[in-house]
Amino acid sequence: MKRALKLGIAALLAACGSMPAVEHHFASEADLLEIQAVLKRDLRVRGSATLARLDADAVQQACNLNGNAPPEPLVKTLEAQQMAAINFPAGSLIGDWKRGESIAQSGRGMQWNDGPKDVAGGSCYNCHQLAPQEASYGTLGPSLLGFGKLRGNSAETQKYAYGRIYNSKAYNLCSQMPRLGHSGTLDEQQIKDLVALLLDPDSPVNK
Amino acid sequence: MAEPMKIRATLKGDLADVRVLMVHPMETGQRKDTAGNLAPTHFIQEMSVRLNGKSVIEGQISQAVSRNPVFSFRLKGVKAGDKIEIAWLDNLGERSQADVAIA
Amino acid sequence: MRAPILFLLLISLANGGFAQDVKKEIEKYQQMVADSSPVELFELQGEILWAKRQGPNNASLEQCDLGLGAGVLKGAYAQLPRWFKDADRVMDLEARLLHCMGTLQGRSREEASKRVFGNEDQPSEMEYLSAFVASQSRGAAMAPGQAHAKERAAYALGQKLFFFRAGPWDFSCASCHGEEGKRIRMQELPVLSSPAAARPVVATWPAYRVSNSQFKTMQWRINDCFRQMRMPEPAYTSDLTIAIATYLTVNGKGEPYRGPGTKR
Amino acid sequence: MNLLRRNTIQFAAALAATLLVPLRAFAAWNKEAFQAKTAADALKGLGVGASAESRDIVIEAPQIAENGAVVPVEITSNVPNTKSIAVVIDKNPFPLTAKFDFGEGALPYVKVNVKMGESSFVRVFAEAGGRFHTASKEIKVTIGGCGG
């Protein structure tokens, strides 16, 4: 009876789309090692994309092994580790929203065809709606239109936005969003500029 | 080997739908090629469609027609066995022509 | 140059109904583009190359066995990837063509695969050949091999690779192709693990891409996803790429082939 | 193999073709109209004077083009005795894109893929009985995804 109720709730949640069904594709760590070995065998270094990029990280390991839904204690531990590794700069985290907008537009960075002189972007519009003027936005992530209007721009909110861009996994361990600071894609100033795009009252995101 | 041009004609009653595919870069003069150099302006300017040797359509086009041009036309009073010829001439004086018999 | 895009109308009429209209109009665009595609030119050139004698043996590819016997083209592409006894390996179209360039024409793998991804100024031999061979399966139901143990192993490996998150951005194929109704910018993303979404995809690749006037193969498609996932580059026709192609094609099996397609 | 670039062999073949095929009477390319940088100058070059809006010209084209490199446009003139159709893309650097003269045996119909640098009106002018008829359609140009 209790079990039936639980299943019923799970089905309801799944139907609402708020809780995607957990799918497990890897039975064991040995399984993960096998796939990693295939990647290392069949992928080749090109440009900045070296094989060292395939070294597994504890977060990837936990998410892969548990269908992106690891047990709660593990999630807490790993999220705390990720959070501790964020370098929060002192002072205001709000940079220049105009520069932030062009960083959000750019999909460059970390690809094997990006030259050493190419400045990386955040690929933000690939997945998120931001400024209303840009109608060509993706929907893999939530809409961020009105982000600052909704939340204000207190020091706490700045820190949240900065941290979320720097390392989304510190907030949601198996988030699909890249860890843009942690991975070395964006630097401190670029992330501040993106924070400005999200929080500055003058930013088109908040108009 | 001449560059391929493909003509396809389908007959419905005495109406023929004619589709022609041409191989041409249709360079506007503003595109950088893969080596990073500005590709010189190079595009088809004139084309002509003939039915059994008689001109039925004369076309003039600009560099704003897409690369590897595809055109569709409609001819009337056509019967199986009729011959359709299509020819083009570009701004560098190059030409191509092809023909097809309607099946 | 990628200019930011303004849909002035979209802004002034930002409501669900209009978004639906936008989607419908983009579908109409895609349909019209497909109807007036120059893709046949690539098929034509591929046919010429198929019969062209070249390599140390001065031989054509006409006797290439694509799985249905030497020289049988009709419907052969629809049954790839499949296991080949002579190579004891699961091969996709490009792997098999490379194999035949070696066995029939006497060409080295290195020479034959030196330039497999072309550009708009100079398409590659592999692109032309892929266009021609695939066109010979139009109308045939996609039926990749799944009888042999190695074919089933390729599928299983492809499935795992599809969901395996790795690289500096923690991406797997499923990061983008895992959830219904999502898109990158304006590009709709098929959920390739689902037959309903995989079927039209496998039925239309390889394909001509109008945005850059290039013909693209399935090996290229997989290669470019790895680039965008910020991973190192897959070796051409490696087991990894063929496993992913097998997973994708088996998911889309049953769909009549109607390519080579035309994409935005 | 290079399909899209000329080489000497192909040039020779093209030359041979010109010798074998009877001389084509190409209508001389209207330089003045095609090199005009504004729609108004292009129309002047074509000799298009006053024109009347007409519902008998049907322009079938997408309202939104995912990529300006290829925009399919299908034009049918139902104006009786249409002799020619001209296509003008207002915002292109050279607005005049195509002009087709139809003789007996051809329907006043054409489908062609055009390039559009930006969103623009596409206007069609049909000549019939010494008069010009016109219709237009706005096409918005965008680009697609991240390169996938």
Image (cartoon, rainbow, N blue to C red):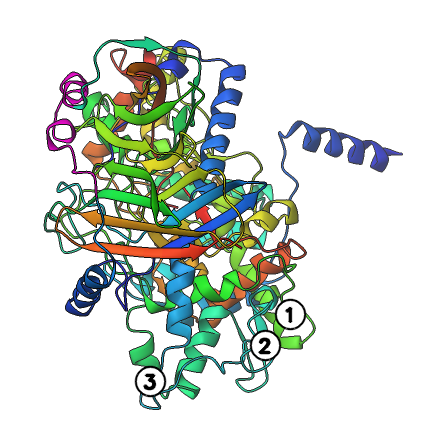
Crowd around label 3: few <14 · some 14–19 · many ≥20 (10 Å): some
Question: Considering only vertical position in the picture, is C180 above or below C114?
Answer: above
Element on which disc 3 rests: loop
Amino acid type for the residue under numbered disc 2: Gly
Q: Camera-side residue: C217 or A15?
A: C217
Is residue D31 magenta-colored?
yes
Q: Which mark is residue C145?
A: 1
Return the chain for callout 3.
C
Q: Which mark is residue C67?
A: 2
Q: Camera-side residue: B7 or D144?
A: B7
Answer yes or no: are tags 1 and 3 on the same subunit: yes
Amino acid type for the residue under numbered disc 3: Ser
Does the residue at mark 1 contact the one at mark 2 (Cβ under 8 Å)? yes
Crowd around label 1: few <14 · some 14–19 · many ≥20 (10 Å): many
What's the magenta region? D26-45
Q: Position of residue C138 (x, y in %)?
A: 57, 58
Residue located beneath label 3 in the image: C108
**Residue, x 33% and y 15% (percent of image)?**
D134
Structural distance between the alpha carbons of marks 1 and 3: 27 Å
Q: Camera-side residue: C144 or D10?
A: D10
